[in-house]
Image: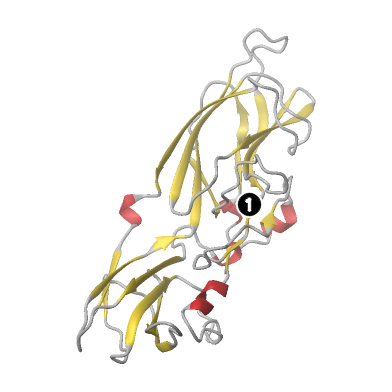
Amino acid sequence: MQSLDLLFFQEKPLQKLDAYQHFGAVSDTRVEGTSSLAATHAAAFSNCPEDPYSWSDVRTFASLGGKAFRLEDEDPSAPMMVGTTDLPEGSRRTCRIILRTMLSRITLHSLACDFTGRSYAGEMLKDIRAYLTYARSECHPLDTADRPASWINAGRLDEGQTAALPHPEMLLAELGASVGTRIYPARDFFCYANPSDGKDFGTPVTRLVIEGRLGDTVYYYPIDLPGLKPGVQYRMDVTITRAGSTDPDIPLESGTVLLQSEVLPWDERELDDVHYR
């Protein structure tokens, strides 16, 4: 953890802010915070931007629901995380807060082309890159009614918007000059959770798009992702079997992509418990 923000709140119904502390780099999983005996609840946030005014509008626990987290502030090597807990009674209290990331991780584990039976059998897909479209760019993790409302790459790659991110590799990857037999890029992409599976009108589904040139034409292979959950990894092995779509926002013809996928824990080695004492 590069930083930790710890907030304490008093009992219901108002749950007023009782105390706030900021910690720099945390090398241990145990930190000592100070609150009054009236505090009954704690919230912890790690790796947030160190803006001295970022918590100035928090007066109650309910106001944390309006706290927005933005993809532009994320570093996938140290993602922002959040956790809350109730405090036990006593003058010297110890509790455990589990911090979890708000990001979803999409892993392109492997990619191959198999054009057997096509007029272009034996050709390779060239100038390949992969990226996320309808990547959710903002979330409110403590708002129970939180819904996606802002996107990066809405429908197609916006190179300027993506390049403006401090970590554009979260959304875009160059995969190589050509692909025929299977390659294993094991490339990770990151965005905030999006519960949409694309079945309801007006709720875009996040997609992993593979783009490449076959002959003189650039084709797109948009792959609809399942409803993305925070702190979960979606790992995919992709086989392309024919020419794709000429528009990244148009679904593929059935059978164009063969997909093997798994839903896995984010990375158990990255989940640390923070103990407040």
Q: Residue at x 73, y 37 (%)?
A: 248
Q: Is residue 193 above or below residue 246?
A: below
* Residue 171 locus on image (x, y percent): 60, 50
Q: Residue at x 28, y 91 (%)?
A: 37
Q: Is residue 68 above or below residue 255?
A: below
Camera-nearest residue between 216 and 158: 158
* Residue 7 locus on image (x, y percent): 40, 81
Please name the residue that numbered disc 1 is placed on.
135
In the image, farthest residue toward the top: 117
Camera-nearest residue between 194 and 122: 194
Q: Is residue 120 above or below residue 186?
A: above
Q: How is the image coloured?
A: secondary structure
* Residue 114 locus on image (x, y percent): 59, 17
Could you tell me the amino acid type at mark 1?
Ala
Q: Residue at x 35, y 78 (%)?
A: 41
How many callouts does the rendering have? 1
Horizontal side of 245 relative to 266 (left or right) equals right
Image quadrant holding the N terminus, namely bottom left
Camera-nearest residue between 200 and 208: 200
Camera-nearest residue between 98 and 184: 98
Which class describes the residues within 10 Å of circle 1: few (<14), some (14-19), or many (20+)? many
Q: Is residue 68 above or below residue 168?
A: below
* Residue 81 locus on image (x, y percent): 43, 65
Judged from the image, the secondary structure of the residue bearing numbered disc 1 is: strand
